[in-house]
Image (cartoon, helix red, strand yellow):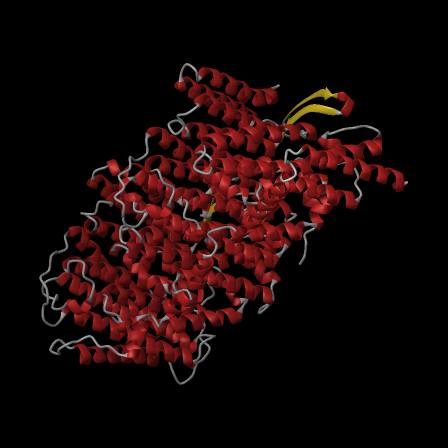
Amino acid sequence: MILLWLVLIPLIGGAVSLVAARTSARACRWIAAGAIGLDLLLGISLWGSPSNARWINELNYAWIPQLGIRFHLAIDGLSLALLLLTFFLGLMAILASWTEIQERIGFFHFNLLWVLAGITGVFLSVDLFLFYLFWELMLVPMYFLIGIWGHERRVYAAIKFFLFTQLSGLLMLAAIVALAVIHRQGTGLFTFDYESLVNMPLSPAAASFLMLGFFAAFAVKLPAFPFHTWLPDAHTEAPTAGSVILAGLLLKTGAYGLIRFVLPLFPGPARDFAPVMMTLGVIGVLYGAVLAVAQNDFKRMIAYTSVSHMGFVLIGVFAGNQIALTGAFVQMISHGISTGALFIIAGVLQQRMHTREIARMGGLWETAPALSGAGLFFVMASVGLPGLGDFVGEFLVLFGAYRAHISLTAVATLGIIAATLYGLKISSQVFQGPNRNNWRLPDLVPREWVIFGSMMLCLLWLGLYPQSFIRMFQPPPANPVQNVALVQPIRK
Amino acid sequence: MQHLLWLIPAFPFTSAVVLALTGSRFSRRLIAWLGTASIALSALVAILTAAQFLQSPPVGNAWTQHLWVWMDVAGFRPEIAFYFDPVALVMVLVVTFVGFLIHLYSVEYMRDDDGFARFFAYMNLFVAAMLTLVLANNLLLLYLGWEGVGLCSFLLIGFWYREPANVRAANKAFLVTRVGDTAMAIGLFLIATQLQTLDIQELMRRANEQWPIGSGIAIAAAALLLGGAVGKSAQLPLQTWLPDAMAGPTPTSALIHAATMVTAGVYLIARTNALFILAPQVQLAVALIGGATMLLSACSAIAQRDLKRVLAYSTMSQIGYMFLALGLGAWSAALFHFMTHAFFKALLFLAAGVVIQAMHHDQDMFHMGGLRSKLPLAFWSFVIGGSALAGLPLITAGFFSKDLILWQAWAGPNGNGWFWIAGMMGATMTSFYTYRMILLVFYGPEKREISYKPGAAAAIPLCVLCVLSVLGGYVDTPPDFGGVPALSNFLNSVVPPLNEVHVGPITEIITALCASAAFAIGLGFAYFIYAPWRKIVPREDLLLRLWYSGWGVDWLYDHLFAAPFRFVVNRSASDVVDAIYTGLATLADRISLLLRVTQSGRIRLYATGVAAGSIVLFAVILFAR
């Protein structure tokens, strides 16, 4: 039942805070934070449970038996780690919006919590129909978050986000239905059950075709080059909480989908397409980094760094070995935190300066040293400084990818230099240099200390003791990841 | 004591964290205490550990302390673990001890700076990172320290962040060294893939078993590590960041040049010596790079006007000697020179800090003069440190360490006459620019009033370093002179021992005599040109300008790399890929515009349409069968 509660608590919390906002904005915020905090505690309670079984915990009800659709939730190490990230970042997002959001507070928190519920459902569903339902559930509240509380071009960005995600999602729906139909042809039964479908034999042509359907949805969410262009607009225009959830969590649902569904359902095509996917990843790494350097809008710049970082994830997923895949996993978690933190920094700055333009910043260290120090910390995490989480992810991805494809990896490693360039641009043009415009900003308030302090601790933990997470990811024998480990390394 | 190894980096790291978080609320006194005591404690632990190590050398000649498993994926299992052997011992002692003296000095140097706590936080972190680097038992943990050192140098070079030039210098240092680090990262992938481990001792053992000498894989591994080393150690072709790194506060320069950072590359090559022995071509490249950097930067040092830039080029040149020694296979000689260089270069920088403060933070040597009587301590520090740098025979530490390298350049297994001659030329130039500097700064007429005299916190480190710059050389004196090469013997238990194969017309005595002659020639020329009674005017000619600019490498790189990159960036602010999607949207818009025309509201048109449609439909039904 605990899994059902994980989804229900944010749904109910969202509704309650919507009502509560009519009487008190404060109560609404506390209820929202409390609901997610409760979820976080529930998630932590699952940590360390014995995991010899296929799933740590499972919930399986018949839902629409005529079509073989079941309400089937299950959690393993991968889902649990991503759920903890979800609730942690959700809490950070609520805290970051504490003073930023002053309009329609109730509806804002309703949407925020419902997005989180959708994401939770995505990470828990092992029935493909249910998965698609939650996939769509994430979309609508996010659309409102961007469209209502966003910045100048919010409507444009919201529609663009909706179109990209919706269209690619429909391709996935088609592929899901096709899988169920193929299963019926073979066995006479409809099913959307993950485990039945994983073991179903597919003709190579059908497998390739259906894989591309799934890949479309996940590549847009990830985002993989060249499907990334919704991201800079959505991230830039969204309110801080929206950007944190977009970058920290929604992108991870794409990576999660690749690991959970694409690799186990279609191992053959995943291997055949791997060079193409890895190449897209490498292009994403470099393209994202170069465009990040070129931006003048702080949030847009961080958005492009996300494109670059998620390129590493794509490489890791398709490199075809356990090391790179583990790297992609660690990168997902730590990118969520480091980039989420950078978006909160951008939000904190925008609230104080009313601008996102880098050219108007500079020398902020002088007036807000703690804020600048935190900013520099997260920039360094983002450029992959060892000792912080992103390094572990990138290193393992590249190290694993090296076994698969040496020359592609060498090119991807140039991403380290490119990352340095955008990192230096932020540090030198925002925090250092002369304070030309004579900014006088208030430094961090206690609430912001809590946000940044806890995010720093998480990144240090991930950087110095990633094993605690890697252990969770290591599969028991029956885990689909095992299939991936059997995939032969590709030689160039 | 081997269980306390972790304390050596932990003390400065903890203090750095505390200072960074709460330092702004502490009094200056407390900050100074915390900042220096942490290094002192770590030096103390290092000394005690070393004492125990020397007293009862452990089995295998090393201690390993395993702390925890960093990550464990599919057989790849690097640990957070420290390794203490004679090489680590020498490095740790030098880093903590010289680091401590520099911190003590900084208490006075930075006394009026409003970033007092921040400065000590960065400096502590710098030392912690360097200690992690030298104590790491595997290359991945070494890489952590390696990047940490890079980060701290970036923070300290840009310490006075309000000045755009300082920020640029900091960025340059970080970026250029990271280019090298990228090569090194690929090297780690290669080694870990081929040898299945990053544990340094284990990987060298496996490399010896699996890789034939001169095999492609060994060459690639060594060359990639060399890429990292030239970046950190400011050798050709990644040397350009170091002269600009002078933008940081002077104690920072002392730390970067003497105890940390630039020596990391030397340490890396010495540490992974087996890989370089397996790749003789790369080892030759190390010697060539070292020799070339030594000569080119010595030329540049001759042409500088800025006191600190002379010292910066001199560091590059001296690290060049160390690389030369590494390339010649004289591993312990490189480490010996590292140690003496740490003493006298720290001394020179700290003394330069005194001079610069006295000169109202003007660093141009041609604005100085006659400071001998005003700043006697700085003068004697410069004389002693400079003589050690130039290699004043038999007395100074620098003579013995440099002499060992020169002797190996001739007699070592990879030595030959060319390296020997290059070394001698370098020695002459070193002596020349050193005494040019001393004559310009301390002799001749006084040009300005001084504004500062060093207090106790500055004087103590100078005095201690003066002593070390003299006595430091006696830990390793040549047997031919009736001495005992204690340090070499000690280090030779872990690095391949020194060999002498070329016994020819030149003996060690003759090499020492030639080195002494080189010293004297340099000194003589300097005195001839910059003698106190001469009227000294800065010269300008094409060659000097070329040397002054560091052979124009900055200009070259700017045009070769920076300008094309700026070109690309300036043209990519808007996403070209998005044009496709925007195009699609525009297309949809146009089509809808066309279709909208049909929604005219005229019934006649609609009726025609319905009729036409029905006819077509009927036709299809009729004829399609």
| Between A281 and B259, the one nearer to me in the picture | A281
Residue A14, position as x, y percentages in the image: 51, 21
Relative side of A271 to B451, left or right? right
Give residue B22's position: percent from left, percent from top: 29, 36
The answer to whether residue A127 shows anywhere in this view is: no
Query: Is B395 or A361 nearer to us in this picture?
Result: A361
Number of numbered tags placed on the structure image? 0
Q: Is residue B368 left or right of residue B477?
A: left
Nearer to me, A265 or B204: A265
* Extreme residue in the right direction: B625
Q: Relative to the observer, which residue lies in front, A313 or A164?
A: A164
Q: Position of residue B90 (x, y in %)?
A: 37, 57
Q: Is residue B164 above or below residue B563?
A: above
- Asked whether residue B377 appears in the rendered view, the answer is yes
The C terminus of chain A appears in which quarter of the rendering? bottom right
Corner quadrant of residue A152: top left
Q: Position of residue A121 (x, y in %)?
A: 60, 27
Give the residue furthest to the bottom: B505
User: What residue appears at the point 41 percent right and 29 percent down from the top-left corner?
Assistant: A97
Furthest residue toward top: A23
